[in-house]
Image: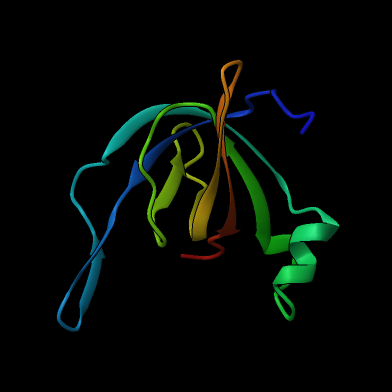
Amino acid sequence: MGYHRKNKTCDIWRLTRSGDNENYGTEPIYTSIDMSIFPASNNILAIYPGEPSMQLYEIFIYDYVTLLNGDKFVETTTSQEWILRGVPRVFDTLRSYFQQCVGEMVIGS
């Protein structure tokens, strides 16, 4: 893996769906979660054809959190946002724990 540098602190917001409505709650479900966010590698870009490469990011989370497709990560100092795409891969061994997921940067919200 090679990445263990935590370069962002984010709040995580849960996407809720009810009938025809989709929205994020009024409060984050997790606050001040340290994570690593990097531009997506070639392996990830090959899975998502047609996506602009500048918008896809690999996100590594080292805390025990439950993530669902559509959850939003909001950086605490800059308010930069990423939306979780798909389901995270969980690596849980005796020596380490982390989740790897793909996020799409929100541009111009």
Of 49 and 9, the residue lying toward us: 49
Q: Farthest residue toward the front? A: 94
The x, y position of residue 64, in whole percent, is: 40, 29
Residue at the spot x=14%, y=81% of the render?
Answer: 19
* Residue 54 on image: x %, y %: 74, 61
* 105 up-or-down from 96: above or below: below
Q: Quadrant of the N terminus?
A: top right
Q: Quadrant of residue 8?
A: top right
Q: Position of residue 37 (x, y in %)?
A: 64, 40
Q: Residue at x 20, y 53 (%)?
A: 25
Most extreme residue toward the right is: 42
Horizontal side of 92 relative to 4 (left or right) equals left
* Residue at x 25% of width, y 65% of height: 23
**Residue 82 as seen in the image, left or right of residue 15:** right
Locate residue 66 relative to residue 93 in the image: left or right. left
- Is residue 50 positioned above or below 30 on the image? below
Vertical position of residue 75 compared to residue 71: above or below? above
Q: Camera-side residue: 80 or 82?
A: 82
- Between 84 and 1, the one lying in front of the other is 1
Query: Quick one: which residue is furthest to the top in this view?
Result: 95
Expressed as whole percent of the image width and height from the top left, the position of residue 51 reads 70, 75
Residue drawn 44% across the image and 33% down it: 76
* In this view, 88 is above or below 36: below
